[in-house]
Image (cartoon, rainbow, N blue to C red):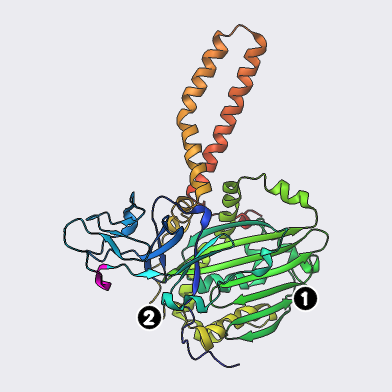
């Protein structure tokens, strides 16, 4: 294999997903951190295009994401009202009647943006080079018939730790027992690498998950931050597990997890579509928390043992089950480097921070934040609802109506208990993985 010596760190000058388009606000800016760079994402209604600027006003370095989109469709700084057009140039400087200086010092740093498959992507290199690279998409899901479920979360560990984890097919029966795995499905895992280059690798697990019951599984790692598993469960569906690992800061990343299904029976997709997205996300968060805490600690253990370069010495890897993990670290050491080569991991976070769902997901998820607002509104009005039902029950003389009022009150009380549980789950995980119950 020949290294791509023109780019010593392949984490730079890349397209990365930063948000699902459905979760972005058209009428206000959004903050996001990418490779340590604070960004402000906003919709330019004049050009009908999403923009990404450095989240620093050139005037006094205030965060533009705390500003607004003004009536002219420009991004306005909250500090002194300077506003900027989609090309990054200053469009209004309220403190002077003189012509606005047209130079780089009065302009925002801009990044190229593009959208594809429902995601907004930002290019981290020079915007003039963005067209030289295609978006990291999964072409097959553009074909008709696919049913797509997806989620995202800001994770308290590095993007390389995330990729290592999702490439490790042998952990699922144990780590995710009682969520998406089952210990009794564990068995020998014989992995085969099919291709291995500076662009990533592909592999085959001929037997596949659940001791061959689902058929062979193919794996693709598309450097630097995309991987997917692909299997066809006979008689059920073709199933992909797609993961983007967007590096945000040292020891932090955002996962975009996508689960496309091509069902043999279209009715299955219609039934799954009935489930609210926010309920699906609660389940997704539970699965992510199966390994979230120990991965946060694991990457610090690896760093203390010398990092990726010392993986083979630090870890005992005697079976074929670790072939993909070894291949990924070979790519890191031979071609890619790490996303933050000059930084060490931050101190360990406390358990509460590791299990935070509100700030790491719900706040930025349109479905979950809306559901939380509705549920909390219901809880606010619950005493008044029950009081009204009580008066209706006491003073209503119609026996049939009294029964209906009682049944409705009972249903309301039971729903309230479930609502309280959902509110809690939209804000915080409990830290007890289901595998530990049995």
Residue at the extreme right:
235
Mark drawn on residue 284:
none
Q: Mark 1 points at which residue?
A: 206
Q: Position of residue 71 (x, y in %)?
A: 34, 49
- Left or right side of 225 for 94: left
Residue at screen point 60% across, 52% down: 283
- Left or right side of 323 for 69: left
Q: Mark 2 points at which residue?
A: 342
Q: Quadrant of residue 411?
A: top right
Total tally of numbered discs in the picture: 2
Q: Quadrant of the N terminus?
A: bottom right
Residue at screen point 63% across, 53% down: 437
Q: Position of residue 383 (x, y in %)?
A: 47, 25
The residue stretch that appears in magenta: 102-106
Q: Is residue 30 above or below residue 338?
A: above
Residue 197 visible (yes or no): yes
Secondary structure found at label 2? loop
Residue 125 visible (yes or no): no
- Left or right side of 25 for 422: right
**Mark 2 in CB contact with mark 1 (< 8 angstroms):** no
Q: Position of residue 195 (x, y in %)?
A: 67, 84
N-terminal of the pair, mark 2 or mark 1, is 1
Q: Who is closer to the viewer here, 261 or 234?
A: 261
Q: Where is residue 33 in the image (x, y as percent from the top left)?
A: 40, 65
Q: In which quarter of the image is the C terminus?
A: bottom right
Secondary structure found at label 1? loop
| Label 2 environment density (alpha carbons within 10 Å; few <14, some 14–19, many ≥20) | few
Q: Quadrant of residue 205?
A: bottom right
- Disc 2/disc 1 C-alpha distance (Å): 40 Å
Secondary structure predominantly adopted by residues drawn in magenta: helix
């Amino acid at each position: 294999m020949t290294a791509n010596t023109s780019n010593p760190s392949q984490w730079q000058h890349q397209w990365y997903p930063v948000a699902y388009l459905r979760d972005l606000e058209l009428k206000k800016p959004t903050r996001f951190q990418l490779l340590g760079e604070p960004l402000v994402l906003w919709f330019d209604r004049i050009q009908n295009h999403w923009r990404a600027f450095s989240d620093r006003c050139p005037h006094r370095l205030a965060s533009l994401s705390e500003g607004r989109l003004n009536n002219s469709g420009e991004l306005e700084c909250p500090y002194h009202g300077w506003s900027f057009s989609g090309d990054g140039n200053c469009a209004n400087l309220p403190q002077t009647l003189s012509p606005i200086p047209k130079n780089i010092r009065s302009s925002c740093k801009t990044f190229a943006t593009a959208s594809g498959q429902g995601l907004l992507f930002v290019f981290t290199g020079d915007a003039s080079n963005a067209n030289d690279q295609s978006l990291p998409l999964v072409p097959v899901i553009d074909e008709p018939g696919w049913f797509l479920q997806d989620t995202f979360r800001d994770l308290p560990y590095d993007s390389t730790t995330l990729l290592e984890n999702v490439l490790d097919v042998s952990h699922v029966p144990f780590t995710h027992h009682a969520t998406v795995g089952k210990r009794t499905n564990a068995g020998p895992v014989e992995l085969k690498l099919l291709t291995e280059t500076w662009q990533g690798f592909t592999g085959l697990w001929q037997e596949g998950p659940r001791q061959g019951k689902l058929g062979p599984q193919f794996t693709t790692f598309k450097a630097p931050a995309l991987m997917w598993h692909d299997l066809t469960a006979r008689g059920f569906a073709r199933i992909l597990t797609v993961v983007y690992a967007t590096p945000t800061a040292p020891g932090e990343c955002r996962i975009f997890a996508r689960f496309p299904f091509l069902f043999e029976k279209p009715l299955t997709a219609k039934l799954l579509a009935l489930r609210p997205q926010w309920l699906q996300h609660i389940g997704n968060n539970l699965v992510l928390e199966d390994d979230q805490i120990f991965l946060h600690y694991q990457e610090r253990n690896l760093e203390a043992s010398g990092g990726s370069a010392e993986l083979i010495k630090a870890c005992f890897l005697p079976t074929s089950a670790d072939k993909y993990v070894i291949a990924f670290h070979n790519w890191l050491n031979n071609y890619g480097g790490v996303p933050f080569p000059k930084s060490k991991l931050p101190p360990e976070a406390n358990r509460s921070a590791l299990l935070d769902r509100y700030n790491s997901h719900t706040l930025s998820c349109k479905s979950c934040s809306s559901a939380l607002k509705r549920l909390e509104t219901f809880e606010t009005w619950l005493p008044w609802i029950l009081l009204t039902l009580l008066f209706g029950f006491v003073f209503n003389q119609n026996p049939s109506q009294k029964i209906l009022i009682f049944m409705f009150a009972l249903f309301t009380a039971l729903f309230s208990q479930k609502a309280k549980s959902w509110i809690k789950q939209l804000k915080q995980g409990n830290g007890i993985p289901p595998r530990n119950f049995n």
